[in-house]
Structure formats: structure tokens, C-alpha cells
């Protein structure tokens, strides 16, 4: 591997860490603040990505108009799921969310005329046709790269996604310290006590779910721009659990723990690609990929045993009902 290709590889890892920061920031608001056990966050990511792709490629809309509508569609999906599902408690809500994520994925797989089916967005207007949303994004990348004097598109994407991720992390941190955020923390720890004070618990929890869904939709946009083409298989339930791994690594309830956890997860996930020594070298590439997840899982278990609140978490945040 050359120095240039090595730099491009780690820039790509950084971009993915930024995307997962946006994705997990939504989980942090939903669970870290409101205590919502959402196992279907990837569904909102898919809704955001597919909405933008359909509007741009099939309807001919400008990407700059379709992108915010993709985020809005993800937020609307969170609203539609939350209205009935938030009346359930704990594990039942988690089951509904993971079921919803699978419904979204199977609809995307079977609606060939709308989503491109199992072939994904490459099939929206025939194989070999470049995604128009990505073409518009690449023009923006090229212009921004010229302004900054950067030739590598991966580095430009790295700067853009992390600028957005850090800004939203800062805003989420400020939001968590407002009365709204303190009410959500109260709901997480003792819903009945907050309700007895006259606070509309259902409304607050719904707001947290919708806000987290919007952030997942934004992560879906960046995912679409980064990869150009995507398919339903890119939105497996495993993606949601990657977000939960990041949340555990960084720490629950601390917004700035999310980018730290995402960077650590990205490094661990990427570094294990280079396990080409025995006994890993005895495995083929497919088996080695599963071993990578096993190694990361063992590291997370070790962290939970030593420091259950995560790297930047506080033990007080672990005291849930």
C-alpha cells in the first residue's frame, strides 16, 4: 500500500466515523437523554437517503432541495412510528423499532419501480447511469476543494462531514443543558415523577425520537454522497448496533462522547483489517471480517467491565430506573 493510498484509506475511515457520529448522536438524544431503547435507527437513515435519491434521480429535483426533504422525511417517519409505539414501554418499544427497520428494508427491496429494488439506486434509471445527486455533490466538492486548495475529494468530504458533525454535537450539548434537556433526563430516570409535575411526558419523548430520526436521516444523506450508489443491504440492523457500540464506547448521556466513540470504533474497525498474521492469516477474507467484529466486541466487553460508563461517561448516567 502506497503512502497516498494509505492516506486515502484513513480519510475514508474518518469520513465513515463522521457519518456514524451523526447517526449515533440521534441515539444519544433518544437514549442518553430520554431513555428510549431504539433498535431501528437505521430505518430513518434509509428513509433520508432514499427520499433524496428518488426526488433527484426520478423526479429531477435539485439536490439542495431534495436533501432537506430527505431529513424531513426521516423526521416524519420518526413521528409516525412514535405516535403509536411510544405508548409501549421498554422492550416492547425496542421490538417495534427493529421491526420497523426491517419493514423499511424489505419495502426498499421489493419496490423496484420506486427504490430500484435489490439492485439499489443504480437501478433507478438503468444500470450504468450515474446518480445525479452524487454528480451535484461532486461538483460542490470540486468547488470547495478549489477554494481550500485541496485536491483529494475524500479529504474535502472529511472536512465537510466533520464540520457538520461537530457543529451538531455542540448544538446537541447546548440543547441537553436547557430545561427541555433536563426534563428528558428526568423522564429517563423517573417518568412517573415527571408526569406528576404536569410535564407532557409523551410529547417530550416524541420530540426526542423525531430529532434523533432527523439526525439519522442526515447521516443517510452523507452516506449516499459518499458511496453514490446504495442498496437495501446497506441498511442492515447491524448498522444500528454499530451505533450502540459507539454509544457504549464513548459514554451514555455525554454528547461529546459520541465523536470520541465514533473515532475509536472507526480506528478499531479499520485497524483489524490488517490482522494478516497467524492465526488470522489462516482464515479467508469473509471469515476474517466476522473475526474483526468479534475482536471489537471483546474489547467493548472489557471496557464495560472496567469502565461501564464509557470513556467520557459519568457513573451518575448509569443510574437509570
Image (spheres, rainbow, N blue to C red):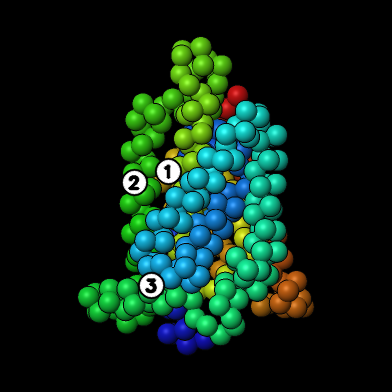
Which marked residue is nearer to the observer: mark 1 or mark 3?
3
* Nearer-N-terminus badge (2/3): 3
Circle 3: element type: helix
* Nearer-N-terminus badge (1/2): 2
Using a 10 Å C-alpha cutoff, classify the residue at mark 2 as few (fewer than 14 neighbours), some (14 to 19) or many (20 or more). some
Circle 2: element type: helix
Q: Whole-percent x and y of residue 145?
A: 29, 77
Residue plotted at (70% across, 46% down): 99
Which residue is labeled 1 in the image? 255
Which residue is labeled 2 in the image? 170
Which residue is labeled 3 in the image? 137
Q: Whole-percent x and y of residue 113?
A: 63, 68
Using a 10 Å C-alpha cutoff, classify the residue at mark 3 as few (fewer than 14 neighbours), some (14 to 19) or many (20 or more). some
Q: In which quarter of the image is residue 39?
A: top right
The alpha-carbon separation of the residues under discs 1 and 3 comes to 28 Å
As drawn, 110 above or below 168: below
Placement of the C terminus among the 4 image quadrants: top right
User: Which of the pair 117/219 is nearer the observer?
Assistant: 117
Residue plotted at (69% across, 53% down): 102
Using a 10 Å C-alpha cutoff, classify the residue at mark 1 as few (fewer than 14 neighbours), some (14 to 19) or many (20 or more). many
The alpha-carbon separation of the residues under discs 2 and 3 comes to 25 Å
Circles 1 and 2, Cβ within 8 Å, touching? The answer is yes
Instruction: Name the residue furthest left.
Output: 147
Inspect this view and state whether residue 309 appears: no
As drawn, 15 above or below 301: below
Residue plotted at (44% across, 50% down): 72
Instruction: Name the residue furthest bottom.
Output: 2
Inspect this view and state whether residue 56 appears: yes
Q: Whole-percent x and y of residue 156?
A: 35, 72
Amino acid at each position: 500500500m502506497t503512502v497516498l493510498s494509505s492516506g486515502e484509506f484513513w480519510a475514508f475511515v474518518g469520513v465513515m466515523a463522521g457519518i456514524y457520529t451523526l447517526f449515533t448522536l440521534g441515539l444519544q438524544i433518544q437514549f442518553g437523554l430520554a431513555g428510549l431503547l431504539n433498535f431501528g435507527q437505521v430505518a430513518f437513515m434509509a428513509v433520508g437517503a432514499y427520499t433524496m435519491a428518488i426526488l433527484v434521480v426520478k423526479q429531477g429535483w435539485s439536490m439542495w432541495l431534495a436533501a432537506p426533504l430527505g431529513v424531513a422525511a426521516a423526521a416524519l417517519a420518526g413521528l409516525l412510528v412514535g405516535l403509536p409505539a411510544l405508548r409501549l414501554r421498554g422492550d416492547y418499544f425496542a421490538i417495534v423499532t427493529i421491526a420497523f427497520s426491517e419493514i423499511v428494508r424489505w419495502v426498499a427491496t421489493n419496490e423496484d419501480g420506486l427504490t430500484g429494488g435489490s439492485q439499489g439506486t443504480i437501478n433507478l434509471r438503468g444500470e450504468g447511469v450515474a446518480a445525479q445527486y452524487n454528480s451535484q455533490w461532486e461538483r460542490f466538492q470540486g468547488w470547495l476543494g478549489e477554494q481550500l486548495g485541496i485536491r483529494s475529494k475524500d479529504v474535502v468530504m472529511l472536512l465537510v462531514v466533520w464540520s457538520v458533525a461537530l457543529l451538531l454535537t455542540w448544538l446537541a450539548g447546548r440543547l441537553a443543558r436547557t430545561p427541555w434537556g433536563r426534563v428528558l433526563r428526568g423522564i429517563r430516570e423517573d417518568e412517573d415523577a415527571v408526569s406528576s409535575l404536569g410535564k407532557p411526558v409523551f410529547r417530550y419523548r416524541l420530540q426526542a425520537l423525531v430529532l434523533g430520526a432527523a439526525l439519522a436521516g442526515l447521516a443517510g444523506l452523507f452516506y449516499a454522497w459518499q458511496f453514490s450508489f446504495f442498496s437495501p443491504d446497506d441498511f442492515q440492523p447491524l448498522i444500528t448496533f454499530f451505533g450502540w457500540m459507539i454509544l457504549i464506547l464513548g459514554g451514555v448521556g455525554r454528547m461529546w462522547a459520541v465523536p470520541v466513540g465514533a473515532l475509536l470504533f472507526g480506528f478499531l474497525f479499520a485497524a483489524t483489517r490488517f490482522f494478516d498474521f497467524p492465526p488470522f492469516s489462516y482464515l479467508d477474507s469473509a471469515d476474517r471480517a466476522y473475526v474483526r467484529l468479534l475482536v471489537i466486541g471483546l474489547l467493548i466487553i472489557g471496557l464495560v467491565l472496567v469502565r461501564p460508563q464509557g470513556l467520557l461517561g459519568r457513573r451518575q448516567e448509569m443510574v437509570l430506573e
